Amino acid sequence: MLGLGFLNSIFLFALAAMALPIIIHILNRRRVRKIKFSSLEFLVDLSRRRMSKINLRRWIILLLRTLAVLFIVLSFARPTLQSNAALFLPGEAPTYVVVCIDMSASMQVERETGTAFTAAQDLAKRVIDEVGSNDVMNVVGFSTRTEVMFETGTHNKQIVKNAIESLKPTGESASESAAIDDAIKLIEESGLDAGAVYVISDFRVVGDSVIVFDAPDRVRVNLLPVYTEPVDNVSIDRIFTPRKLIRRGEVVRVGVALTNHSMEHPANFPLELIVEGRRKAEQLVRLSPAASATITF
């Protein structure tokens, strides 16, 4: 049984905008004044056939405009389809819901309303709001390693939201496959008949990295990107210093090896050198698609 839910259900109020194309259509209807004229008597049948085609075309255009508004609203509401309706319908068999949140270094990228990581936390909490009262919830934070927040899961949404708030981004890379594997293992060990996994990430894979997992039929895996527009996809591969021990006041050169992993977009960004919390230097870096470079401070 399939169930339909929405991650941003507040946007469904905008469905009222579907009435706008209909109102515009009614207001723009041509009002033709009929005048009898004997010499046009033989053109009546031809005129009727032509008008019927014109009216059909108008109805089709009205339908397409209304559907366009519907699809735009639904895209903002972000519908999710579940293999078991228990996730959204109370009173059904309970579902084990696991929310996996990316804590890798790339999630610290600044957005207009905060970092990608704070956006991921907000999205995770909206997923939790849609969970049924009988469902069991758990949270898995992941980067190179995974961190399971609850040993056996919980029914308390506030506790789950507090666990989501407690997660902090790391300086590591991400392994979505490992997080999904751990989530599936939690579901299988729970003994429940159905499970749902939500992976919230920027999905900034490096090189030929792919997401690989083997989910049973009773477990549905949902991949939720925190954003979709292209951004700089640059990694710091290595930091070079002349030696491990540096004397106070000594002038040294620090090299930073960078790689732009995007095959299409160049990268332009400021690179800062911060020592013990203090900003020491900054350079503007420009990298061509798939290019590497070493910046020296």
Image (cartoon, rainbow, N blue to C red):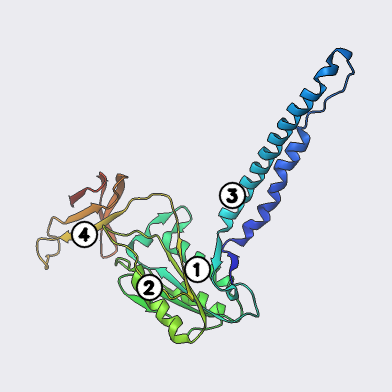
Mark number displayed over residue 85: none
Quadrant holding the N terminus: bottom right
Q: Nearer the viewer, residue 232 or 239?
A: 232
* Kind of residue at disc 1: Ala
| Residue designated by label 2 | 214
Choose mark 3 or mark 4, whichever is in front.
3
Circle 4 Cα neighbour tier, 10 Å, few/some/many (<14 / 14–19 / ≥20)? few
Find residue 271 and report its horizontal and vertical position in percent. 27, 52
Label 1 vs label 4: CA separation?
A: 30 Å
Mark positioned earlier in the residue sequence (4 or 2): 2
Q: Secondary structure at mark 4?
A: strand
Label 4 vs label 2: CA separation?
A: 31 Å
Circle 3 Cα neighbour tier, 10 Å, few/some/many (<14 / 14–19 / ≥20)? few
Drawn side of residue 149 relative to residue 266, left or right: right
Q: Residue at x 30, y 44 (%)?
A: 266
Find residue 156 and report its horizontal and vertical position in percent. 56, 81
| Residue designated by label 3 | 72
Label 3 vs label 4: CA separation?
A: 41 Å
Mark positioned earlier in the residue sequence (1 or 2): 1
Choose mark 1 or mark 3, whichever is in front.
3
* Kind of residue at disc 3: Ile
Label 1 vs label 3: CA separation?
A: 22 Å
Mark number displayed over residue 124: 1
Q: Are marks 1 and 3 in contact (CB under 8 Å)?
A: no
* Kind of residue at disc 2: Asp
Mark positioned earlier in the residue sequence (1 or 3): 3
Find residue 88 and report its horizontal and vertical position in percent. 61, 72
Residue 10 vertical position relative to residue 103 in the rendered view, above or below: above
Q: Secondary structure at mark 3?
A: helix
Mark number displayed over residue 237: 4
Q: Residue at x 77, y 32 (%)?
A: 29
Q: Secondary structure at mark 1?
A: helix
